[in-house]
Amino acid sequence: MMSSWLKNWFQSQKQTRKFHPFWIVLVVMATLAVGGVVWVATYLFKVEEVPAVPAVASSAMPGEAGAQTGNLPATDKPAPLSVEHGGDFSPPDPEDIPEGEFGDVIRLGKNIFTDTQTYASAYVGNGLNCVNCHLDAGRKPDSAPLWASFGMFPAYRDKNKQVNSYEDRLAGCFRFSMNGKAPPLGGKEMIALTSYSYWLAKGAPIGVALKGRGYPELKQPALAPDEVRGKGVFEANCAICHGADGQGTLVKGRYAFPPLWGGQSFNAGAGMSKINNAAGFIQANMPLGQGGSLNLQDAWDVAKFMTSHGRPADPRLAKK
Amino acid sequence: MFHRKSTCFEPRQRYADTVRLLALTALAVFANGWASHASADKLAGGVLAQKGGAGITACLACHGANGEGQAAAGFPRLAGQHQAYLVKQLQAFANGKRKNAQMEPIASALSAQQINDVAEYYASLPGWKSDANPIASSPQAALGFKLATSGNWSKGMPACFACHGASGAGIAPHFPSLSGQISSYTRAQLKAWQAGTRDNDPQGLMKSVAIKMSDEEIAAVSLYLENPALNGKVK
């Protein structure tokens, strides 16, 4: 037998401790054998992979993706049900942030907000940036804009059963959505984020729930949200950026598209982990540039799919 | 098959284990190199790009000696573009999903292997470099910078770089690199998405952005992307 012959040869090698030319033959033969297997495997893999690209393109033909998932853009667009007292408010353009010392702090706040991984890395425990959930650097209506939140604090919150300042509210974001720890109250990061929020909210009324605040409160869907249907919606609309596994897209160690669940995403105490917030955000804003394209049912289903996955535990529960 | 009765600390046996480990490592490295070499051949792609083949015009005739594109005719830059994106476009020209009189016959003449090879070749060429002639400051450049980095959310238009990556470097496989692209090409493509004459974008993502853009915005962003300033400031 080949194997017993090899075994004997190995035994003899152990005893002689001399280099035997058969080592070269053995290594070359093994390399060729494994290389051949891998080569055949990659060839087979490639043959299947190449036609897969036009398949993606074809699913993107107008109407077709909608037909697959039941998307009916613009014909079945739910009206947001958020309680609106105030009128429209337009925040200032970041180009107009003033020069000078206060301007510098506002700009730092904007940088922390859009690139939290760089500017507040010590307080972040996942792969996210504030701007992932607060689009357009915290300016976009229906994406929890800062200008609509700033004037609503101090306020009592059920979340921690006490009256919260605006800084307390920001601290909550770091603790839950960023799965990290809050920057110190009155510290550089808090002052900068508060300054940026204040500047965006300049001219907005105090204590008035402005239009576009938070995430839209969607009507209930016809059918109970279902994660199996949601998976189909996800694959047709979301996976291109967030990945089939929902783990986002990493480019040079940073997430170009954020992970939606798992260890690098927001934790189970975050607002976005609640299906109603997720459905509202998704319907109004996703896919990026196509906000409002998912119908009510698809938005709830895909929110159910997203929130049904594992993520870091709610730190309020872990403490006990 | 290699079980022995002796203990692990016997010197001879450690010698044999080490050799075995080295052999395995070498094997893995060889197999890896071989496998990647087999899937796309950059050198073969380079020959095709420079000399063409049966019924295939040499790519450099239009796309430039180094894949830098040709501004006057609006032929795009290919150097540094993502391989998967180039493969998808060549396949789209070949199967009619993307219309272009010059590219359709060439792409149709390419085999699947040649498409992989030539895409690999152009992906391997150096992409746009940030130090090349920064664009002069102007209202148009400022608008282009703003659209590329922040978008125009008052019209529901996200930033180019939100999907095409920081400084427009692209995010493989679906979002191509934009930085350094010939501006007349980018302008023509945005117009084509708008008009629906190009529609091979995944999920209609590009169309939904392009239809929100004004002519002025298209001109500004195309010009900016030809030479984007990396540090957030237009010189």
Image (cartoon, rainbow, N blue to C red):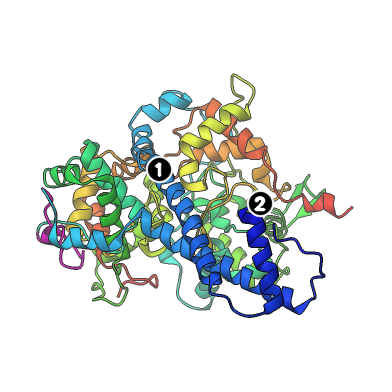
Residue A129 location, quadrant: bottom right
User: Which amino acid does the dot numbered 2 rest on?
Assistant: Phe
Mark 2, Cα crowd under 10 Å, few <14 / some 14-19 / many 20+, is many
Asked whether, in this view, residue A178 is left or right of residue B70, the answer is: right
Asked whether, in this view, residue B181 is left or right of residue A267, the answer is: left
Residue A82 location, quadrant: top right
Q: Residue at x 11, y 53 (%)?
A: B57
- In this rendering, the label closer to the viewer, 1 or 2: 1
- The residue indicated by pointer 2 is A266
Q: Residue at x 76, y 47 (%)?
A: A157
Q: Does the image show residue A84?
A: no
Chain letter of the residue beneath label 1 in the structure image: A
Q: Residue at x 64, y 22 (%)?
A: A224
* Bounds of the magenta segment: B55-72
Q: Position of residue A126 (x, y in %)?
A: 64, 59
Q: Earlier in the sequence, mark 1 or mark 2?
A: 1
Q: Position of residue A153 (x, y in %)?
A: 68, 53
User: Residue A268: which disc?
Assistant: none
Q: Nearer the viewer, residue A159 or A67?
A: A67
Do the dots labelled 1 and 2 sit on one chain? yes
Image height of A10 relative to B54, above or below: below
- The residue indicated by pointer 1 is A49
Q: Residue furthest right?
A: A320
Q: Position of residue A179 (x, y in %)?
A: 70, 57
- Membership of B62 in magenta stretch: yes
Overall secondary structure of the magenta stretch? loop
- Membership of B158 in magenta stretch: no
